[in-house]
Amino acid sequence: MRDHLGRPLVAVTGIGAVTSLGFGVAESWSRLLAGQSGIRRITRFPTDHLRTTIAGCVDLPEEHGEPFTSPVRVEHMAAFVIEEAISEAGIGGKGGFPGPLFVGMPPVEVEWPARFDLARKGHDPSYAAMTATAAGRHDIYETYLYGGVGERLAARFGTRGAPISLTTACATGASAIQLGVEAIQRGEADACIALGADGSVHAEALIRFSLLSALSTRNDAPEKASRPFEKSRDGFVMAEGAAALVLENYDTAKARGARIIGLVSGAGERADNFHRTRSNPDGRAIVGAMKNALADAGLEPGEISYVNGHGTGTPENDKMENFGMRAVFGENAPPISSNKSMIGHTLSAAGALEAAFSLLAIRDQRLPPTINHDEPDPSVTLDVVPNVARDATVRHVLSNSFGFGGQNVCLVLSAEPT
């Protein structure tokens, strides 16, 4: 089976997920369709005097005492979703996984607790003193080595070749999937694992996003805080989570008797260097990424059944996504909804989680809702599947991921050919 450009079709044979709604695909998806929120007050660290005190936290069962650092949390969640995905795919047993690993994850740096500890031990808060105190501390080096997470996951699951670790801001998870898809299309692999994971709910990250005025401050009712496309939206809600897809050459997967969940039939990207957080008002990068994804899939806009929106709940993003949708689809835009209304913005994991949920929408022929949609915004003229999930005929889904810094990636997920 080949696509319209003569490339191998890329099938998805396994999915793993963890979100603030639960561990595993089944729990996260069922609660998402039920319109439940995973946003709650942060208890992991003190939030006194912070403007935002809520998030979509993932509390790991193996975490006791001192909270895990972000890279450790990422590694634990990534291992969980890989395990679930390869188990469903029925591939990668004792002989290891027969393909490469693409790990989308956030940038890492030594976090405040570790720096404070070094400052105390060195009796000096200067960077020079902390660096001297850290000399020989291989545990710090291994924890905060960016590629270390991928190396350890590759060793654990026996993937082939050097693992690829990458970050493209909020588009990271989608970028990891795109790289995996292209490796299979080029014939470099018959199978791969692509994942996005993020565990960035720690004090420093929260304060940084707060200083950008990007976060919701609706602290009194956490479950109501994330309000994509709604008139009173006031920012996104930080969250954690992870998702992994097992991608395979369609013919190879069919030959081994694998169950096909769906296809990744297109990927498009477009960069915008306008601003570190805002999109260019002309919308060219957002529109270009969507059009590139459709062209890569060989589809016309009218063939898209549903759009899994980026839908962060910031005034800027939702306005620009509406603009981009109208530019691409005109008056006949398909329904669009935002998972972030329930699980929050999982940052580096968002593109992978939303691709997974798009595939599940195709599998179950059901659209997840955008909750907290109390008062429509007159400037958002789209059908946002408000508040309640909906049965629908779903064959092709466009999944949007628009990142800070103007890094935009859109994926097209499709039903198996009949």
Image (tube, rainbow, N blue to C red):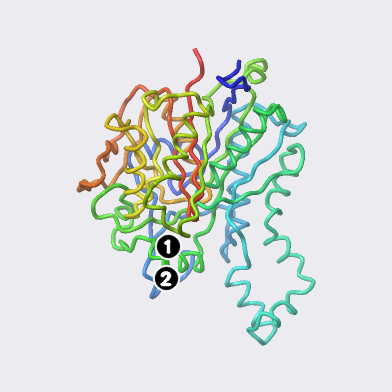
Query: Above or below — where is 278 with respect to 249?
Result: below
> Residue 405 shows which numbered tag?
none
Q: Which residue is pictured at 48% across the width and 31% down the height?
A: 412
Q: Say whether marks 2 and 1 touch (CB < 8 Å).
A: yes
Residue highlighted by disc 2: 47
Amino acid marked by disc 2: Thr
N-terminal of the two: label 2 or label 1? 1
Residue extending farthest to the right is 136
Left or right of 11 in this view: 151: right
Position of the N terminus, as image quadrant, is top right
Query: Above or below — where is 361 with respect to 130?
Result: above
Closer to the camera, 111 or 407?
A: 407
Closer to the camera, 47 or 348?
A: 348
Query: Above or below — where is 54 with respect to 227?
Result: below
Secondary structure under tag 2 reads loop
- Label 2: how many Cα within 10 Å (few below 14, some 14–19, many 20+): some
Residue 5 in the image, given as x and y percentages of width and height: 58, 22
Image quarter of residue 72 = bottom right
Residue highlighted by disc 1: 42
